[in-house]
Image: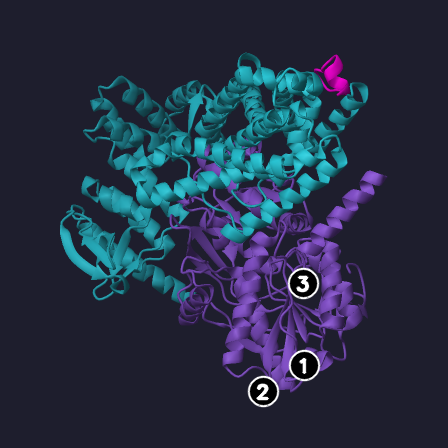
Chain colours: A purple, B cyan
Amino acid sequence: MNFKKKLGGAMLAAVMSTTAFHGAFAADDTIKIGVLHSLSGTMAISETTLKDVMLMLVEQQNKKGGVLGKKLEAVVVDPASDWPLFAEKARQLISKDKVAAVFGCWTSSSRKSVLPVFEELNSILFYPVQYEGEESSRNIFYTGAAPNQQAIPAVDYLAKEEGVKRWVLEGTDYVYPQTTNKILKAYLMSKGVAEADIMINYTPFGFSDWQTEVSKIKAFGSAGKKTAVVSTINGDANVPFYKELGNQGIKAEDIPVVAFSVGEEELAGLDTKPLVGHLAAWNYFQSVDADVNAEFIKEWHAFTKNDKRVTNDPMEAAYIGFNAWVKAVEAAGTTDTDKVLDSIIGVSVPNLSGGTSTVMPNHHITKPVLIGEIQADGQFDIVQETAPVVGDEWSDYLPDSKNLISDWRKPMACGNFNVASGKCGGKGS
Amino acid sequence: MLIRLFSLIFLILSFAAPSFAQSDPKPLINHLAKADFAEAEALLGQIAATGDTRVVPALQAFSDGDLYFRKSDNLVFIGKAAGAGFDLIDPVTGASAGQAAKNAVTKIKINNNLRRVIRSAMGGLTLMSPDRGVRLSAADAVLRSPSAENLDLVEAALAKETDREVKARMEEARAVSVLSSDRSVDEKRGAIQTIKALGGRNALGILGSVSGSIDASLKPDLDAAISAIQSEQQLWDMGQNVWYGLSLGSVLLLAAIGLAITFGVMGIINMAHGEMVMLGAYSTFVVQQLIRDHAPGLFDWSLAIALPVAFLVTGAVGFVIERGIIRFLYGRPLETLLATWGVSLILQQTIRSIFGPTNQEVGNPSWMSGSFPIGGMTITWNRMWIIVFSLTIFFALLFVMKRTAYGLNMRAVTQNRRMASSMGIKTPWVDALTFALGSGIAGIAGAALSQIDNVSPNLGQSYIIDSFMVVVFGGVGNLWGTLIAALSLGVLNKFLEPVTGAVLGKILVLVLIILFIQKRPRGLFALKGRAVEA
């Protein structure tokens, strides 16, 4: 007991030591926005970059004269990869720092943790990461990809261009891969793929010994039908996975792997020569050939004072979310949550792939889906680009959610309207 | 519909014209400039059909993503990056075609499907190469991408081939091509036997791919061949599993062996052990970075150079931690636990501040990349070297502990501190050195683990639990116990994994260990005598 108390105390101390550095004291002529990304702990690897992007965007906006004639001020807090702490920090940002909107979260667990806080205190969260869908909140904008903006087009590409008939759905054991794979399985079976031709596999977080899994994939792929792997493997587990693929000699020509969580940032820790030809599906790649992208990369390198820093998809999602918020605030003439929620729907802002993204009534956005092949230099070569796709929050391929739609415009203003029963509220949350 | 038909006709016309000029593949290659993936596939078929081996460099360049077209005139060249632009090379003659700025040329897009087509086409075209190695890999390429078009080429090459090994490979390649051709049933039956003799996963794939389309009278032969290969493969899979288990065990051993000293021998609950492993990995990264910048020729030696560096760096850090913190906490395990845990957080955040939170790339030297087959098993080089390496460290450590004066002092101090002290041994000094040794070994382990895992500030956390598990299971204070525990846990894990899946497998292993510890609280090999009470 004594021991437990001491351990708890030490944990608290550690958490406090890594917590929060605040921006300068606010003056009345500034608008504050919150940045809620982990700067320590396991998720720091991904989220620190997004904090930097937000600071850059704020700086740029201030150079342009700020918003509504006031300067923007970013309040950065560190939820330390700890899901309950996310809720605490969100509450602090909204109640104590009085921020106008919050940009943050990475994992679905952290988003689920802060969701009730945003609804209770009526503030706005912009969530910039691809996720599994099956959620719609009045106070959250999902600027990352929903499954239909990433997973389904990727599977379509493999089936059409590479003639894939047999599928390995390989994922890390948590909510995003589980839900995505459920959707993909239903989708593939609706396209006539036999159940025996789909293998679903999960591994724990941070899994590093991929020998058995990779040889299982090899065995599954030797049934005479073209096989591909759809990977929802998360974070750190990817590096050993790709290393094992390379070492066991699985070439992209034989068994291609398409990943939904591997971007430029993840590849930076890898020798990509054995991986050329493996795929990823995103809504943005650093290699996108567009003037606005070239400009963004230039500013990013200047801001970080490091011309080796890569850009990636969640950064684009943060960029779109921020600009949409700025435009909505200027249209509303105030940062008042209810007014901004009304004015932001239908707002169109440029995205980094050369088109525009529009905020839809379901609080998701439109964006094109890009399929890229890994190159020897750690970048992606884009082999396919679709027309802009509207994010679909309730998947059409899951029995629980296929009748649900979300439309936050008045008078409907409902996140889970059941088109079969004609009532707001149904299965799902 | 009409438009589609029209464009189809147009496509046929535009291809038909150059295809008359059978002897000259150049116009075909130039057409690649504006072709989409489907058109490029058709063009590649025609290029291969010219039988002109001069196109091989162009195909290779296409496959490697080095084929470009000039925007001004849509002519296709092989491009080699040179300074700010490209050196252009004629795709057929190989003559230099001047230079071009980066934005004057566009890379011709390639995807996996086209790479496959190219591989097969190149296989067919290089079967007659004067170079034995090229012929062998050509036969391999045909073997891996069966197509009826290559059959005539293989047979022509086979008639001329004199080298035995190449000939055998070509026989197999021929069998593969025969199966997907419209040859007679008897010939196909022979081909099935050849492929059956070949064995392995590839053969299974080849046989499986034709099972739907093959003549009904051949079906029994085919099924028999498939099940024969499968039952043979099952045996090999068993061996492969043992190998995977040993390999996982060797990683566990590496991670745990430093802890076997600091926790096992000294009794310090050392939560910062994982961070020592991480520091070792970062030392390797820094050494590699220096070598890349200053002496790229030494790259294959970078690991050998990094090992002593990692040992010294982490050993020194361990020494400082022992002198600065731990020595005040001997005999107070809970405080030690908290203090070392705090140290681990500090070290993590320090590394995060210096190197950033993202993964760092540690390259594999060439002798640690790839794999080699033993029968139906695939042995990857990096795993093999790690097994060898961890055993070497283990026995070196055993030697130090059992056969040197320093080892004797160390054992004396841990067994009976006061007695050792009265015999004139400087116990504080021995403590510090022992902790430094344990830390240094963890650092060496980190250098090795950097080859198979992420080098990130979180590296250590993922090993700390496994390390304690191994040391406790093996029996605290017993090096041999650590070895046996690591290897047996590895093998157990790998036999559970295919049956239960990775997630459940890991849980089962933990449950089994908990049950085992209930029965034998002191682990596999418990130390007896006074040492236990100390």
Residue for badge 3: A393
- For disc 3, the chain is A
Q: Dot 2, crowdedness within 10 Å: few (<14), some or many (≥20)?
A: few
Tell me the chain of label 1: A
Q: Earlier in the sequence, mark 1 or mark 3?
A: 1
Amino acid type, label 1: Thr
3D distance between C-alphas at marks 2 and 3? 35 Å
In percent of the image, x 76 and y 72: which residue is there? Answer: A95
Whether callout 2 and callout 1 share a subunit is answered yes
Chain containing the residue with disc 2: A
Q: Is residue B47 above or below residue B73?
A: above
The mark that comes first in sequence, 2 or 1, is: 2
Identify the magenta region. B522-534
Q: Is residue B468 toward the left or the right of residue B209 in the image? A: right
Q: Is residue A1 or residue B169 the one in the foreground?
A: A1
User: Which comes sooner in the sequence, label 2 or label 3?
Assistant: 2
For the C terminus of chain A, the quadrant is: bottom right
State yes or no: residue A295 in magenta: no
Q: Is residue A329 above or below residue A126?
A: below
Instruction: Residue under label 2, please give it.
Output: A69
Q: Amino acid at mark 2?
A: Gly
**Please, what is the three-letter code of the amino acid marked with disc 3?**
Glu
The mark closer to the camera, 2 or 3, is 2
Q: Main secondary structure of the magenta part?
A: loop
How far apart are the two marked residues, 2 and 1, measured between alpha carbons? 12 Å
Q: Relative to residue B121, is residue A281 depicted above or below?
A: below
* Secondary element at image label 3: loop
- Camera-side residue: B142 or B277? B277
Badge 1 is on which residue?
A335
Residue shown at 74% from the left, 33% from the top: B333
